[in-house]
Image: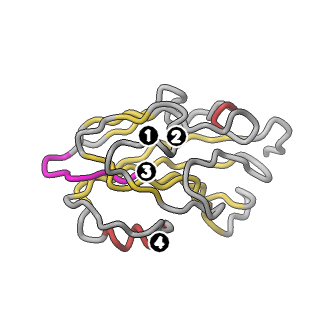
Amino acid sequence: MLELRSQGFEHGGDIPARYTCDGKNISPPLIWAGVPDGTRSLVLIVDDPDVPDPRAPTREWVHWILYNIPAQVSSLPEAMPQIGLPEGTLEGRNDWDKTGYGGPCPPIGRHRYFHKLYALDAVLPDLALPDKVQLLKAMEGHVLGECELVATYCKARCEED
């Protein structure tokens, strides 16, 4: 069974400020195991479904998209740079209309951040900086397994219930 973890935080726990706009805004270290047989590539999507306010969310905010991660890769180090991604890995466009990681920066309340890993039976074509919707469409019929790592973040002065 596919499993995703981080040495930076626990599933269900708090994301440390270093991985957010309040800190260094660097990507967390990620490690995975249990990649299904037949996997040819992996996809990572990080998003926040609680935008703008967790009490009344109206949309998802995509923080990071990587696809065509080689199947033999089993981790990404902290502060994964855009240059130096595993060979063959391509990036998508986040909701800041950029590539690369953009850390949590909730405008209000405690938000959830979903780190989703997908194992595919194919290497996708170059989709020219796809957004999440375009990437999910290209993945249709190719997902062998998926898992998620969820953690939360609330700015130092956020208002919680």
Q: Is residue 36 above or below residue 144?
A: above
Label disc, if present, on residue 116 of the rendered structure: 3
Q: Residue at 62% of width from left, 35% of height from top? A: 15
Quadrant of residue 153 within the rendered picture: top right
Q: Is residue 126 left or right of residue 29?
A: left
State which quarter of the image contains the N terminus. top left
Q: Earlier in the sequence, mark 3 or mark 1?
A: 1
What residue did someone put label 4 on?
Answer: 133
Q: Earlier in the sequence, mark 1 or mark 4?
A: 1
What residue did someone put label 1 on?
Answer: 84
Instruction: Name the residue nearer the viewer: 97 or 9.
Output: 97
> Neighbour class for label 2 at 10 Å: few (<14), some, many (≥20)?
few
Q: Residue at 62% of width from left, 49% of height from top? A: 102
Q: Amino acid at mark 3?
A: Lys
What residue did someone put label 2 on?
Answer: 81
Are the residues at dot 2 and dot 1 in contact (C-beta closer than 8 Å)? yes
State the image coordinates of residue 79 (x, y, percent, origin top left): 55, 34
> Neighbour class for label 4 at 10 Å: few (<14), some, many (≥20)?
few
Instruction: Name the residue nearer the viewer: 15 or 62.
Output: 62
Q: Is residue 89 left or right of residue 57?
A: left
State the image coordinates of residue 107 (x, y, percent, origin top left): 79, 53
Separation (CA) of disc 3 from disc 2: 19 Å
Which secondary structure lies at badge 2? Answer: loop
Q: Amino acid at mark 4?
A: Val
